[in-house]
Image: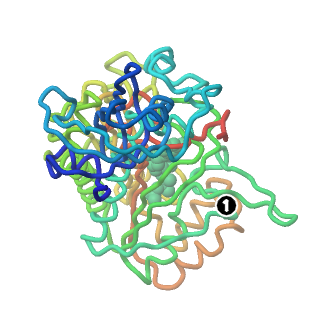
Amino acid sequence: MGKTVWIGDVQDGLHDEQTVELKGWVKRTRGSNKIRFIVLRDSTGTIQCVGKRDVLGDEAFESLKGALIESSLILSGTILVDERADGGHEMTISNVKIVGSVDPERPFPITESAMAAADGGETEFLLDNRHLYLRTSRMTTMLKLRSSAFGAIHSYFRGQDFIEYQAPNFVAGAVEGGSTLFEVPYFGKKAYLTQSWQLYAEAAMPALERLYTIAPSFRAEKSRTRRHLTEFWHAEMEMAWATNDEIMNHGEGLVRHIARTMLDEHSPELTSLDRDIERLALYADSPYPRMRYDEAIEILQGKGVDVEWGQDLDYSKEKVLTQDFDLPHFLTHYPKIAKPFYHRVDPDDGNYVLCHDLLAPEGYGEIIGGGERTWSEEEILKRIDEEGTPRDPYQFYIDVRSYGGVPHGGFGLGVDRVISWLSGAEHIREVIPFPRDSRRVTP
Ligand code: 4AD
Ligand code: MG
């Protein structure tokens, strides 16, 4: 009996010729009545393990033979270096323990052929079995990339002296417009699930000056697109005294840092997804161009897209716009009528607001929305009334401005969208373990 080791370390050559113990799950199994080949998987990698009847004895050999795909096993044996084996190593099994067996009447349903039948997309069958689908190599890779992105967001903001701050998820009003609000019964009253941390962050801005969060946000998005979830992970920041340009600098810095971290931590995984590493390096190293909304409208109209000045850009338009971009682009100065009340009106031209969206290239579109905030009490009241929004739910937000209001701003980044773009996923569903959309809250 050797000590328990990670398969990843074995494949890295850390245990050559040693007798060790591996704990894992059966990924594939084949063989005859005399010899079994088990590809064992743990969270760090896979390795082929070979069991022979004449070494193991009949009883242990029979239990190994009965171990179906996704059974959990503890195998002891010797690690051999073998150029022909996947990863360059193989284990000769000397001892077998079946920990969790799989019923032959109910074999593991997520087979290669079930995935091939889904043809790259995800059928309802795979979504129904999401709790099992998580174990496939593609999904495991996505979850590792996801973890890398979350780590990068924390390290970016903490490295810039931002303070992590939490806002409530039950709220009384909309941030991003009423049409995507989820209403929940709340002890005889109505409450809503938050669309954004922003308004509560603005309340703490005079206390903390630079703050950030990573939290779920909720949007009752009825349309099912490749980039919309009803529950998504939102990285948001708020910053005192900051201009639109300074906020964009942080948005750019953050996205580049996420791309760099993913490359540093997971280049082989990105390559296994057929992602072009050179392209990602460009996203990590290059400054992102900035253009005004008006220019984007001209480009779109030049391409024959039916779009009018004053419209917010929906996915179909951003897709056309960003198809030929080789880098993310900031669009700034949207028309006031296209954006919610909290956006600060441009003092140089009252038709525009000092805001930005960051659009990812390759047709992915918006990944960040942000800008300067309407910061005086007088102006916020004017904007709320102009929009025809009731003042009541925003009383605290108005109050904050009456006691030493200062210019400030921030942004929100859709974490799932960024991971989807950087990993080259076809659909945002591919990068979140249990995706939520208008048709699905299970499993
Ligand atoms: O552009 P949005 O709506 O802006 C806000 O919520 C601001 N209050 C943020 C702020 O300034 N603090 O959302 C921000 C980002 C979008 O750019 C997008 O990446 C993501 O959140 N997002 C979604 N991601 C997945 N599914 C959805 N339904 C999303 N809605 C927004
Ligand atoms: Mg937006």
Colour mapping used in the image: rainbow
Q: Is residue 179 left or right of residue 127?
A: right
Q: Position of residue 56 (x, y in %)?
A: 36, 37
Q: Is residue 365 left or right of residue 385?
A: left
Residue furthest toward the right? Answer: 188
Please tell me whether residue 281 is drawn above or below residue 344 in the rendered image. above
What secondary structure is found at the residue carrying circle 1? loop
Q: Position of residue 335 (x, y in %)?
A: 44, 44
Q: Quadrant of residue 363?
A: top left
Q: Is residue 389 visible?
A: yes
Quadrant in which the N terminus is drawn: bottom left
Q: Quadrant of residue 157?
A: bottom left
Q: Position of residue 356 (x, y in %)?
A: 36, 49
Quadrant in which the C terminus is drawn: top right
Q: Is the CB of the residue bearing disc 1 within 8 angstroms of ligand 1?
A: no
Which residue: 67% across, 60% down? 173
Which residue: 14% across, 47% down? 16
Q: Nearer the viewer, residue 222 or 147?
A: 147
Q: Is residue 411 left or right of residue 20?
A: right
Which residue: 50% across, 43% down? 433
Q: Residues within 10 Å of mark 1 (few under 14, many from 20)?
A: many
The residue that label 1 is drawn on is 173
Q: Nearer the viewer, residue 213 or 312?
A: 213
Amino acid identity at mark 1: Gly
Q: Nearer the viewer, residue 90 or 165?
A: 90
Q: Position of residue 96 (x, y in %)?
A: 41, 43
Which residue: 26% across, 41% down? 291
Total labels: the figure holds 1
Q: Is residue 247 left or right of residue 394?
A: left
Q: Nearer the viewer, residue 418 or 313?
A: 418
Q: Is residue 288 visible?
A: no
